[in-house]
Image (cartoon, rainbow, N blue to C red):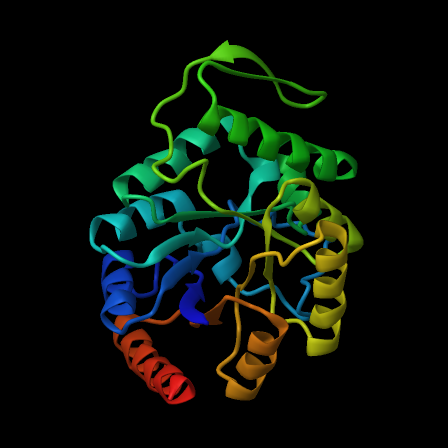
Amino acid sequence: MKFGISTFVTDDTIDTVTLAQAIEERDFDALAIAEHTHIPASRESAYPLGGELPAIYYRTLDPFVTLAAAAAVTSRIQLVTGIALLIQRDPIIAAKEAASIDLISHGRFVFGVGAGWNLEELRHHGTDPKTRGALLDERIEAIKALWTTEPAEYHGKYVDFDASYLRPKPVQTPHPPILIGGDSDATVKRVIRHGAGWISNPLPVERLTRRIEQLRDGAGHDVPLSTFGIPLNPEYWSALERLGFGQLNLLLPSLPRDEALRLLDDYADSVAKYRG
């Protein structure tokens, strides 16, 4: 099982270059970056973890810019959007950004996507919350077409473009891995429909077990399993390894440089002990 680091890189935390290099130097396998474009000041959507919404949600850097910077100073780690809110992004631009990172990194990009939870945020992008599931499906399909076909075209209810050329194409074939986030029956169906993997939050083991059973039953095979935001808890890691997770991305709090580096040292020691 592989271990990565997942985090919110913000304007007052460790810088991207130092963070990416530190992750690779400590033998982690991935950097997964969260996304929120902004947070509306007037908000009705409840924070999923309860309480007040932390400031990191509106201070986070753009994930594609962050991962491009990380790609330039690393040679081994995977570069993961964890998750890109695709219902808030133009699919043609997203396809080019993602393929560009895959090219710059020599095939290390992983496309984690999801529909998001902050209804006010997505409304600011012109997305109707009632259509976000169907919109996400079409944008995934359209991006895959742009990555794998030339010229590519897509004609759906929400995404519609005629035959077009788009370069660069991703280095990975047929395209970078796609991981879909969420915790619902609809998420399970979406993962299966797109032949994707699942990127999960740190849910209780019982709920993870149920979702994975649904995924395997529906797909008829094992589905790639990854995470975002896993705590420093070897017992939990062991439970997830038994469930078939191939990668755990540990949550690094958004901290200044020196504090973040010290914590990464602690994480690396814990992972080394776990691996024996």
Closer-to-camera residue (86/48): 86
- Where's residue 32, x and y in %? 43, 58
Disc tally is 0
User: Which quadrant of the structure image shows residue 226?
Assistant: bottom right
Q: Quadrant of residue 131?
A: top right
Above or below: residue 269 compared with residue 67: below
Residue drawn at 71 percent across, 58 percent down: 216
Q: Is residue 182 above or below residue 167?
A: below
**Residue 93, position as x, y percentages in the image:** 45, 28
- Furthest residue in direction front, as rendered: 220
Instruction: Please say if 103 is above or below 23.
Output: above
Instruction: Give the vertical position of 162 relative to 204 (above or below).
Output: above
Expressed as whole percent of the image width and height from the top left, the position of residue 79 reads: 37, 53
Can residue 62 be seen here? no
Residue 163 appears in the picture as rendered = yes
Q: Position of residue 152 (x, y in %)?
A: 50, 17
Residue name at image x 42 percent, y 15 percent: 165
Task: Answer left or right for 166 relative to 177.
Answer: left
Which residue occupies the foreground of this view, 30 or 16? 30
Q: Quadrant of the C terminus?
A: bottom left
- Position of 110 with respect to 244 (left or right) is left
Q: Nearer the viewer, residue 124 or 199?
A: 199
Q: Residue drawn 22% across and 70% down?
A: 25
Q: Residue furthest top?
A: 162
Which of the two residues, 67 or 167, is positioned nearer the viewer here?
167
